[in-house]
Amino acid sequence: MKSKVIVYQKTYEQVLEMLREKYEVIYFESVNSANQAEFYFHLKDAQALLGAGMKIDKELLDQAHNLKVVSNISVGYDNLNIPELTKRKIMATNTPGVLNDKLPMPFLD
């Protein structure tokens, strides 16, 4: 049985296809009041969350009984409750440096 990964933000189809080769992927372009119940239904047995901007707090983690990793597609991690993730032995990742070569700085010339 494949591990369940929830992707909770709009992403490229190639990324989803790559993930689907190894994992059961549940995809939400975004999580909102219309699909929040479905998100939490899948969260209870998901092993991974992949996205950005969602507040990963104690209340959310209380619903995530099998979660092993939260991959934050963002430079920062202020939306992640690191002490709570650590207490639960859930790995958290982010993408530091991903924007370094994207920032135009013509004013430095």
Image (cartoon, grey):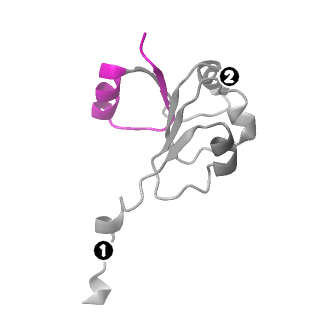
- Looking at the picture, does residue 46 appear above or below residue 33? above
Which residues lie in the magenta part?
1-22
Residue at the farthest left position: 109
Q: What number is the disc on residue 104?
A: 1
Picture quarter containing residue 109? bottom left
Q: Is residue 72 magenta?
A: no
User: What is the three-letter code of the residue carrying label 1?
Assistant: Pro
Residue 73, can we see it? yes
**Direction from residue 101 to residue 9 in the image, left or right:** right
Q: Nearer the viewer, residue 56 or 53?
A: 56
Element type where label 2 sits in the image:
helix
Picture quarter containing residue 87? top right
Q: Which residue is mark 2?
A: 37
Indicate the position of residue 27 as horizontal and vertical percent values.
47, 26
Q: Are marks 1 and 2 in contact (CB under 8 Å)?
A: no
Circle nearer the N terminus (1, 2): 2
Indicate the position of residue 108 as horizontal and vertical percent values.
29, 88
Q: Is residue 14 magenta?
A: yes
Q: Quadrant of the N terminus?
A: top left
**Direction from residue 71 to residue 17 in the image, left or right:** left
Indicate the position of residue 5 as horizontal and vertical percent values.
47, 26
Picture quarter containing residue 20? top left
